[in-house]
Amino acid sequence: PDRIGRLVLVAVGSRFREEQLKAMEEAIQRRSDEPWFDDASAALREEQEGKFSDDAELGRLVARELPFYFAHYGENERAFVRSALEQPVDAAALRYFNTHEFLTFDLRPDLAAVTARTLVVAGEKDFILGPAACREVAQGITNARLEVLEGVGHLPWIERPEEFVVMVSSFLNA
């Protein structure tokens, strides 16, 4: 900790709660009129149930479910999804997280140990780790500030790259 002067945390949570799962399910259902909804929902369900045999199959599932991670699924976001298909995904790690850690991990007791000035960035429309989850992290770190980007989902550097760069750069260079 003594070697870290500033820390940026984006779309982060200290735990998963039943309220988050309910909010996530509601956010998913609000997108039910999207043309990609049925395919993304099926992929998300298969990923969560561990219905993949290897890293390549998991990578294809994750790419199919990625539209949920954006507030708006435009050309930048589609380009990101296409590039995501080329990135390796560790199936064993994700399977372990989904079956052993997802509803049991709790980092809140450790947040007070973070002494660095911290910027916590949340996307207002993040369906999985939105403002409430990020606020809990920011409140647990003594020198933390929460910034919520309106109209943005889980990946603000994709949806609003210029604004994200300015925000992070300003914080790091202050």
Image: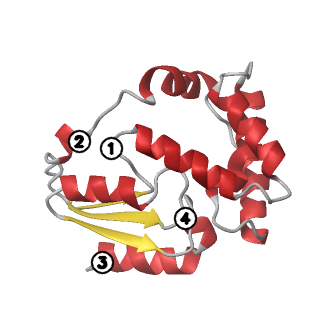
Instruction: Please give the name of the residue rendered at 21% of the width and 58% of the height, measured from the top-left corner.
Output: 139
The quarter of the rendered structure image containing the C terminus is bottom left
Badge 4 or badge 3: first in the primary sequence: 4
Mark toward the start of the polypeptide (4 vs 2):
2
Residue closer to the observer: 112 or 84: 112
What distance separates the C-alpha of mark 4 from that of mark 2? Answer: 23 Å
Residue that mark 2 sits on: 108
* CA distance separating discs 1 and 2: 6 Å
Check if mark 1's residue and mark 2's residue have beta carbons within 8 Å.
Answer: yes
Disc 4 to disc 3, C-alpha distance: 27 Å
Give the mark nearer the N terminus: 3 vs 1: 1
Instruction: Locate residue 66, reporting x and y percent.
Output: 69, 50
Nearest-to-viewer mark from 3 and 2:
2
The relative height of residue 86 versus residue 170 in the rendered view (above or below) is above
Disc 3 to disc 2, C-alpha distance:
28 Å
Q: Residue at the location (74% across, 18% down)?
A: 53
Name the element at disc 4: loop
Q: What element carries label 3?
A: helix
Identify residue for label 4. Answer: 125
Q: Residue 34 or 139: which is nearer the viewer?
A: 34
Question: Which residue in the protein does label 3 denote?
Answer: 173
Task: Name the residue located 86 percent from the left edge and 57 percent from the top edge.
Answer: 35
Amino acid marked by disc 2: Arg
The residue mark sitting in front, 4 or 2, is 4
Residue that sits furthest to the right in the current view? 35
Location of mark 1 (residue): 14
Q: N-terminal of the two: label 4 or label 1?
A: 1
